Image: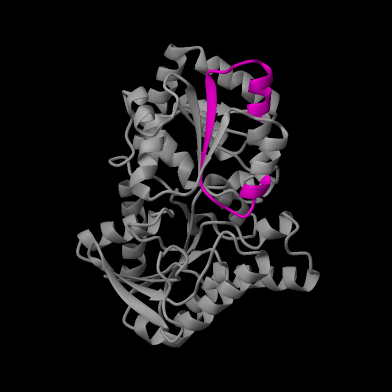
Amino acid sequence: MNIFYLHQHFAPPESSGNNRSLELAANWASKGHKVTILCGSGNFDKSLSWFVIFKKYKYKGFTVLRLNVPYSHYYPFLQRIISFIKYLIFSLLLAFKMRKADIIYASSTPLTIGITALWLKYFFNKPYVFETVDLWPDTPIQMGVIKNNFLKKALWSLEKIIYKKASHIICLSEGMKELIVSKKINDEKVTIAHNGTDCSYFTPCINKDFVKGKLNLTKGKFTILYAGTIGEANGLHFLAEVANEIQKNSQHSVQFLIVGNGNRKEELKTYCQNKSLQNILFLDTVPKAMVKQFFDAADTGFVCFAPYPILETNSANKFYDYLAAGLPVLINYGGWQKHYLDEFHAGFSQRTPKEMAKQIILLSQNKNLLAEMGKNARSLAETRFDRKDIAEKILDIFTSIKSN
């Protein structure tokens, strides 16, 4: 089968970005399928010369066509939109390279990636599967980023057309599926294929103090890890308030480790300084190979989002990676992730900093509970969220579409 994968935010092996698309493509290629990914340049270290439209790479048996379209989490909203439009224009110009594909796999964000899929359907008669990584336009609308009524209606209309014309829709969580089906999309047309994790890469670590020593972290301290983007949607002031509650309770054996970058990082650091917080350590984004060391050093993993209901549908990769590493997961929202954590007894959900601080103190003082929840977290990752199983599920959908 010839699979053409439209994914602007593909992350190469050496980057720190989400490598879901890399792992899916490698899995399909290992089974003899031809896979090509058309991506932007956001997760590549070196920029391309201005006159280069695209550059070709080979990774793990599949091909990557990298467009000269920069992108960064530091970009303001308007600059991100410009990046999305540039990717759309270049992808339409290179549509002829997709004319021999059997399946087009179009992964949002942005929503406009569906326009390229529609173009290929109508002009080259190519079936497409649309993947919703984030729910657009609902997310930026609910967060107040998109306010113009005409633009809202236009984006909702585009979303409806993309869903209706897709041969199938892949979404990354139960919450996403619920919202998509509520838009009068046939339930049978929508399949949940979680973001997932590589259970062979992220594994539980026994000697955490040894790893903490290697990373110059304080041995013996109960460490809560946040690894990911520090942006508006992540709402990390909540984490800072939790740290403040713990510090006020003189729990000096607890430390927070924030590894990542984003356009709200400096603001968050200033906030922590103004609060005189001594229990938070900030580190910049590190290569994927080094990220694992921080997972090995951590005792729990933290996922945080701003209080918008739409964000409860999220499928952040760190949630799954924490589980695979045997870390109980702490979240500040409800929804489908809370249900899994409650069912498997693999973490906690608390919506207030004070209650979250109580749960962290409880875990830090109860080694048996911590070990039990860590074991349950690993079991949850293995049985529900292994990316090998997810790749198989998506491939089965491709095969079904091709045979019809």
State how many labels appear: 0
Image quarter for residue 281? top right
How far from the left and from the top, in percent, is residue 387? Answer: 35, 48
Q: Is residue 89 found inside the magenta-colored segment of the image?
A: no
- Identify the residue at image location x=35%, y=78%: 55
- Relative to the observer, which residue lies in front, 112 or 208? 208
- Identify the residue at image location x=57%, y=21%: 360
Q: Is residue 249 found inside the magenta-colored segment of the image?
A: yes
- Relative to the observer, which residue lies in front, 338 or 204? 204
Task: Report the span colored magenta.
Answer: 242-267
- Relative to the observer, which residue lies in front, 284 or 3? 284
Q: Is residue 308 above or below residue 138?
A: above
* Color scheme of the displayed model: one colour
How far from the left and from the top, in percent, is residue 346? Answer: 47, 26
- Identify the residue at image location x=53%, y=26%: 255
Q: Is residue 369 above or below residue 44?
A: above
Image quarter for residue 254? top right
**360 lies left or right of 217:** right
Q: Quadrant of the C terminus?
A: bottom left
How far from the left and from the top, in percent, is residue 263? Answer: 62, 55
Q: Quadrant of the N terminus?
A: bottom left
**150 lies left or right of 95:** right
Q: Is residue 46 visible?
A: yes
- Identify the residue at image location x=59%, y=47%: 313
Q: Is residue 396 visible?
A: no
How far from the left and from the top, in percent, is residue 44? Answer: 41, 65
Image quarter for residue 4? bottom left
Q: Is residue 82 above or below residue 18?
A: below
